[in-house]
Every structure is written in structure tokens, then in C-alpha cells.
Image (cartoon, rainbow, N blue to C red):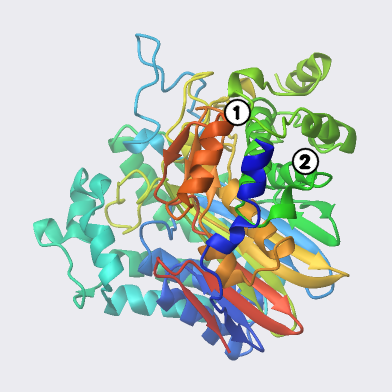
Amino acid sequence: MQALMCLLSFSAGLYAQGVEPVRAKHGMVVAQEPLAADIGVSVLKSGGNAVDAADAVGFALAVTHPVAGNLGGGGFMLARLADGTSVFLDFREAAAQKASRDMYIAPDGNPTRDSVFGWRSAGVPGSVAGLVEAHKKFESKPWKELLAPAIKLAREGLTVSTPLAASLQTAGPLKQDSESRRVFLRDGNPYKAGDVFSQPELAETLQRISDYGAADFYQGKTAKLLAEQMSSHGGLITVDDLKSYKVVERTPLSGTYKDFQIITGPPPSAGGLGLLQMLGMLDGTDYAKHGANSLEAIHYEAEAMRRFYADRSEYLADPDFFNVPVKELLSPKYIEWRRNTIDPAHATPSDAIFPGLPKALNASARAMHESPQTTHYNVVDEKGNAVAVTYTLNNSYGNGITVPGLGFLLNDEMDDFVAKPGAPNMFGLVGGDANAIEPGKRPLSSMTPTIITKGGKLFMVVGAPGGSRITTGVMQVVLDVLDFSMNPQAAVDLPRFHEQWKPDFLYLESGFPKSVEAGLQQMGYALRPVDGVARVEAIVIKNGTLEGGTQSRYHGKVAGY
Ligand code: GLY
């Protein structure tokens, strides 16, 4: 094994290097759809702050990027202001009051597919409330100005790009719903690149949000129409659920890694805690010695991932319903013990790894309470305010249902709960009681919006979509920049891997040398190919210059000025 390790040392040299990031001096937006990124930059150029731009991008993506941009989903916003304060807005979807623990269990005791498909798969949407709340807190530009570009695109139509046409044409769930077929698939005459795609119902919904703010979506015409449609289709969300939806402001999690301060998402994000725990396990090893994506680096990172995902299954959930043992899971002693269980030369079988806190703590942790598609964007403004937003419908195009008369798709976020202990959800994640369904509760998330500082100064803004792979994807890009000194473009383009404890596979994107794959197999990893681990986007601030990266093989944009 030692010989193999040496042979593969410095294998980062085997990967494509030398790609340059987009650079800008004043402000930058990185988003997964170019029209939205440009809208964000024009808000910055006209004097808006990073939160203004983030709001405008959020509404624009709901029009231009229907696969994940949304009004009918939820998400997280992490902001670090130029004065050094940071804020986390949790606008994750919540389970309706009529939701119940076993609502997705069939009479034979097995989970149904109703957490993914159909009206009952939707949680109470939080995105509109979240974007409104952000504006209330950090207002700089008039609200209406932030919605105007999205309304124009929805009303007058946007020119369909090749990626949007391809995405719509292959969107299976949209075909199952008559309103989605009409709105997004033109009833069997699918949009082609160059066609004009207008969304008049969505434009009207956005106009009401522009005129009345969250009051319309949660208590006004939109709320009434949504609740009526829910009721007539056997869905759960009522006017009362919408009226009582609240954005929760939470204290971000923070920790240090070498010279860097990591600010990230607290529960119900599992991602932030995972990021800090995995970085903690890697710190104190010499995993980085042989270079990015070397056999040694992959091994240590994968073993850290495996251990975190075991903990995730047991201890992570909505902190308003479950006493998440954050301090214990991030305690240096615990992390050191976890690190010491890593065998330098062999993969540890997942069956030999368990959620790791002492049993007594597990008991008290329980005692307190009685797709995959998502999207991420980063914004930095001229003053140094930084915002990272990840929001989602869960699956691509959510549950595929467009609300008649309202023009937006619904989420299927209920699948992020544990429908049945031990039964995998659509990302293959397993969990237990902590993340069971309860009325008003928010499902556990992998979304990991993260901001990193160095010496008190903004250094990096990063995040990703990718279901359960978000956390591991973000971690790899963070390491590529912090430990391997890559620019953000090179970092996001480097092949990534993913390990999540169960099932016991190491998932690899294409692009790893055969020699590395052979070495991993020899160490005991069962390899599986994966299309993409997570579509990570990052901004890094280097000597006062903004550098942005979005994965070259997709169609996002780094827009700066
Ligand atoms: N729906 C993906 C996540 O929140 O993890």
C-alpha cells in the first residue's frame, strides 16, 4: 500500500490545471442561469447592496430557471456584512399542520412515493417570505425595483436558451401534470432554443408580491388560490398553514480551519455542521501532502464524509423540534476520536461505523421533544457585503405540479424528512426519529451556503445544489482553495467524489485517473460512477480582486464589473 501511495503521490498533476477565473473589481454575482446573474449585477451597479441583488436574483431565477428557481420552495440565506456581522435566514419549507409521522407509509408498512410525487409531497413554501425578510432587514433599494426584471421576463417572455430547452424537454415530472404540460411544455409542442417563453400567471403572482409583499403570498389572493387548489387535489396546505409560516433567523455556525474562519448554516442545515466536522477530522492529518484528488487525499476526505453522514442520520434535524447536539458533534475531543478511527491504508466498511456520540447523549438528544435539484448563487458587493443563497424545490421541477392560476411549481421537500426509519429517501439518505415528520417542522437539509474569512476579511463565498452531495461538494471546493491554493474556477472544475455512509459506495465523477480508481479499489472502496457530485459555485477575494468560478460544463455565469 505504501508503494502504491508513493506511486500516486502528487497525482493532482494528473488533473487539468490552469483555468482562469472571471475577475472583477467592484461586485460579482455567480448564478446558474446567466440572465439572473446579469440582473443581479445590474442591481449592484445601480447602487443596490448584495442583499438587494440576492433578492433580485432569487425572483429572476424563479422565471428563468424553473428547474430550481422558485416561489414554491424554500431555502437558506447566509449574509456576512462588511461590518463583520453575519446573519442566517432559514426560510425552509415547513410541514403542514395536517402532516403526520406515518403519512407516507402504505398499509404494507413500506414507504409510498407520495413524498416525491403529488400534492401531498409539498411543504409550506418559504422562499417568498425569506426574500421579503432579507429586504426588510437590509433594505437599500425599493422593493419593486428588485422584482421588476423578473416580472418583465415573465410577462414579456424570455428567449429560450439551448440548456433551458433541453431541460424542459427532459423533465419527466412536468409531463404528469396537465397545468405543467400547458405552461412548460406547450401541450406537446416543446419550447426550442430561440422561442419566446412567457409566463403570464407567474407574472401576475410576482406583480402581487411586488405590490403587497409577503402579505399576498401568505394571506392574500395567492394564499387563497393555493389553498383552494391544495384542497381540491388532496393536498395538505391550508390558508392557516400559509398565514402562520415564519422565517427563522438563526445564529450561523462558525468554526476555524487553519487560518480561516468558516461561517456556515446551522441546523436544519446538516451541511454546515458536516462541513465543520469533516474539516475538523482532516485538520490534524497530513491528508493534503500529496495534492488535490491524490489517492491519500480522497481516502481521508471520504472517510471523514462517511463518519459525518453516520452522525447526520441520527443527530441532525430541525432544532426547534429536536435538541441537536451541535456542541458535542463539533467538540475537538469527539472529532479527534472520530479522526483516530480512520485507517490510513484501508476504507472502513460503513457497517463498522455508527453515529458516534456516547449512548447516554443519544438518549438525551432525543428527550427534548416529545435532486435532485436545488440552486445556489453568491453575491459580493463593492462594500464587501457577501450573500450566499441556496434555495430549492428539492427534485428537479419539484413535484412537477404547477398551481393553476399562479404559474409556479410546488416543492416535494417532504421527502427530506424520514418517511420511515432506515428507509432511504430519494438521495439514498437514511435517518431516524430526529428527522421524522411533525406538523410545523422543517425537514433536514444538505444545503451548505458558506462564507469564509481570513484575518477578519472576506475571503470566499461558496455553495451548491446537489441533494445529499451538496455538503461534500462544497467541502472539496473549500479544500481545493484553502489547502491546494486553486483559483475558484479550477476548484469548481476539478472532478469530485462523494461518500455518504449508506449505501457504502464511493461515487466518482468522470475524470479521475484509472490509477487513482485502481488504488481506491485496492483500499476497499466500492466505486460507483456519478454524473455530477454538486454544481459548486464560488467567489474568492484575492488582493482586493473578486475571482469567480462556475462549473465550465454547465451553463451558469460569473457576472462582475
Ligand atoms: N432538498 C435538498 C436539501 O435541502 O438538502
Up-down relation of residue 295 to residue 65 (above or below): above
Residue appearing at x 62%, y 27% in the figure: 313
Mark 2 CB within 8 Å of ligand 1: no
CB atoms at circles 1 and 2 under 8 Å apart?
Answer: no
* Nearer-the-camera pick, 423 or 228: 423
Image coordinates of residue 273 in percent, x first then y, are: 72, 43
Q: Is residue 390 visible?
A: yes
Name the N-terminal-most of marks 1 and 2.
2
Quarter that holds the N terminus: top right
Which disc is residue 435 wearing? 1
Q: Is residue 271 something that shows in the picture?
A: no
Which residue corresponds to the image point at 79% horizontal and 75% vertical from the top-left? 82
- The residue that appears at 38% across and 47% down in the rendered structure is 398
Instruction: List x then y, in percent, for residue 282.
Output: 76, 45
Q: Residues within 10 Å of mark 2 (few under 14, many from 20)?
A: many
Judge the density around disc 1: few (<14), some (14-19), many (≥20) Cα neighbours within 10 Å: many
Nearer to us in this view, 350 or 273:
350
Whether 317 is drawn above or below 464: the answer is above
